[in-house]
Amino acid sequence: MTVARTTTTDPFDDVAVLCERLKLPEVARLAASWAQQAAAEHWTYSQYLADVLQAETTARQTRYVVSHTQMAHLPFHKTVDQFDFAFQPSLDERHVRQLLTLQWVDAAENLMVLGPPGVGKTPLIVAMALQAIAQRIPVYFITIQDLVADLRKAWEDNRFTTRLGQYLRPRLLCIDEVGYLPLNTLDAHRFFRLVSARYERGSLALTSNKGFVDWGHVFGDPVLATAILDRLVYHSTILNIRGDSYRLREKRRAGMLGEAAAPHAGGGTPMTVGVPVRLKRRADDGFCALAWSFRTVINHRL
Ligand code: ADP
Ligand code: MG
């Protein structure tokens, strides 16, 4: 096969033009200088070619991660390596790292992170989100307050279905702070529509400071809460963090907090089980959905 040359004389001018056409900016940037280095250091042609293409691939992945991290709307960018597992002994680091393989996202399952304020629920789902972005999985992060406000606005503007469709696009949707504020009935219904629409189609990673038994209050209606929980929990992993607030630890160490801010020690946590629990309901399970959800709640409080 013959190679069609462009009219310029310096081959690296050709390279620049061709790289522009092929959208290979990193190759264009490095080709000439690395060719000089290759000649000086006696690299093989194949090594030179592999190295410039590898540089392009790495740069492309970096660009992807930067732009998609922005689009994912994360509150901060901490990875799991910045998480202090020693501070939260109720959390099994191996299990969290296993979850970072994101097999649960491949299976369109959910992750629910429960625990009192300040124990690191948000950083855990952010770590999952960052890992998902690195694996080129579409991700979006939002607090439940912003989510229901957005859906409410869309409802008022008569574009609820379209907006709902946009929340179905990310394969991983992170919803933070469920339970901090109770929802009114209409907001709760719209949230239910979202959870139903994503059910078995896309993953949710959700944090809550409330145990499941309190969700009736959060959603203003126990039946609706059960319907939401049933869909969330059916294929889900639950991490229940029983621990002390990370934010308050320094202050507590310095003796700046009194008894009122004493460590939770598990007693005030949403659920009293300390180990991650993986829940699966078999399709032939004889229990009806409602009974199953509450049975789960009760079991997990043991
Ligand atoms: P939660 O979402 O459970 O309320 P936060 O994310 O608000 O917890 O945690 C408060 C702050 O403490 C955040 O800046 C978070 O990154 C940090 N943090 C919490 N737990 C840990 C931890 N175990 N290791 C490192 N940082 C932590
Ligand atoms: Mg948080």
Image (cartoon, rainbow, N blue to C red):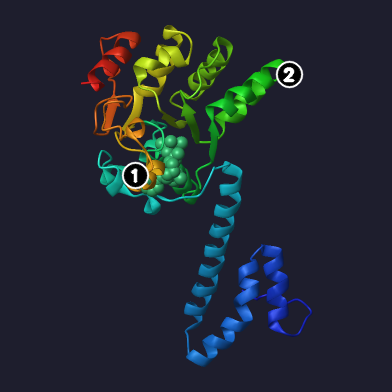
Which of labels 2 and 1 is toward the front?
1
Look at 41% across and 43% down and name the residue there: 247
Quadrant occupied by the C terminus: top left
Give the answer, above or below, for where 15 lies relative to 199. Answer: below
Look at 36% across and 40% down and name the residue there: 103
Classify residue 225 as left or right of residue 27. Answer: left
Does dot 2 land on a helix, a strand or a loop?
loop
Q: Nearer the viewer, residue 172 or 185?
A: 185
Position in image of residue 52 (x %, y %)? 55, 73
Disc 1 residue crowd, few under 14, some 14–19, many 20+, Cα 10 Å: few
Look at 48% across and 32% down and name the residue there: 176
Give the answer, above or below, for where 101 lies relative to 293. Answer: below
Q: In the image, is the residue at mark 2 within 8 Å of ligand 2 by its beta carbon?
A: no
Position in image of residue 283 (x %, y %)? 30, 17
What's under tag 2, amino acid-wise? Asp
Look at 73% across and 71% down and name the residue there: 17
Q: Nearer the viewer, residue 103 or 81?
A: 81
Disc 2 residue crowd, few under 14, some 14–19, many 20+, Cα 10 Å: few
Judged from this view, the residue extending furthest toward the bottom is 40
Q: Nearer the viewer, residue 149 or 29?
A: 149
Q: Which residue is the site of mark 1?
A: 255
Classify residue 191 as left or right of residue 161. Answer: left
**Cα separation between marks 2 and 1:** 52 Å
Instruction: Residue 157: give its label.
Output: 2
Indicate which quadrant contains ligand 1: top left
Position in image of residue 69 (x %, y %)? 56, 48
Among the two numbered marks 2 and 1 on one chain, the one whose residue lies closer to the N terminus: 2
Does dot 1 land on a helix, a strand or a loop?
loop
Position in image of residue 240 (x %, y %)? 31, 31
Residue 234 falls in which quadrant of the image? Answer: top left
Q: In the rendered image, is residue 122 in sight?
A: no
